[in-house]
Amino acid sequence: MLKKYAEMQRDKLRAMNERVRDLSRLQQQELQRLAQLEQHSALIHTPQSVSSVLFYQNAVAMKASVEQVKEVQQQRVINTSNDLHLQQDAACKQRAYYLALLTLVEKRKPAKYQEE
């Protein structure tokens, strides 16, 4: 019975490790998006001399919009990073729990099986 419970915990650990990998990939994607937004923001500049006030206003508004999106993206990076760290901690605890169960299972084996 304890062995079956240990197998269930192993499966739970595998699922947690898969979630860690998924979150790690998501974090990389979010970081790439942030880098792209930063590049785009750097390319948008307010013209020094303009032929039209409307052109100047559009450039300023576009820059402000990109900055807002960049702030939202920075928060998404922070959130995915926090989620990843929480999941890594949970997986680490699950790994310790599973290894402790394996140790108990090994200790409960009869002596004749341990010699073989």
Image: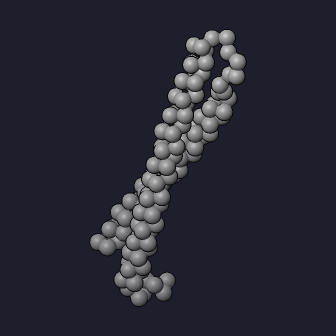
Give the vertical position of 112 relative to 49 (above or below): below
Q: At 41% across and 63% down in the image, what residue appears?
A: 90
Q: Quadrant of the N terminus?
A: bottom left
Residue 74: x and y in percent read 52, 43
Q: Residue furthest right?
A: 49
The answer to which quarter of the image holds residue 40 is: top right
For this view, does 22 lie left or right of residue 6?
A: right
Residue 89: x and y in percent read 45, 64
Q: Tag count in the figure? A: 0
Q: At 50% across and 52% down in the image, what residue appears?
A: 81
Q: How is the image coloured?
A: one colour
Residue 54: x and y in percent read 57, 13
Q: Residue furthest top?
A: 51
The answer to whether residue 77 is visible is: yes
Give the vertical position of 77 relative to 112 (above or below): above
For this view, does 46 lie left or right of residue 4?
A: right
The answer to whether residue 29 is visible is: no
Q: Nearer the viewer, residue 42 or 7?
A: 42
Q: At 70% across and 18% down in the image, what residue appears?
A: 49
Residue 91: x and y in percent read 44, 62
Q: Nearer the viewer, residue 69 or 31?
A: 69
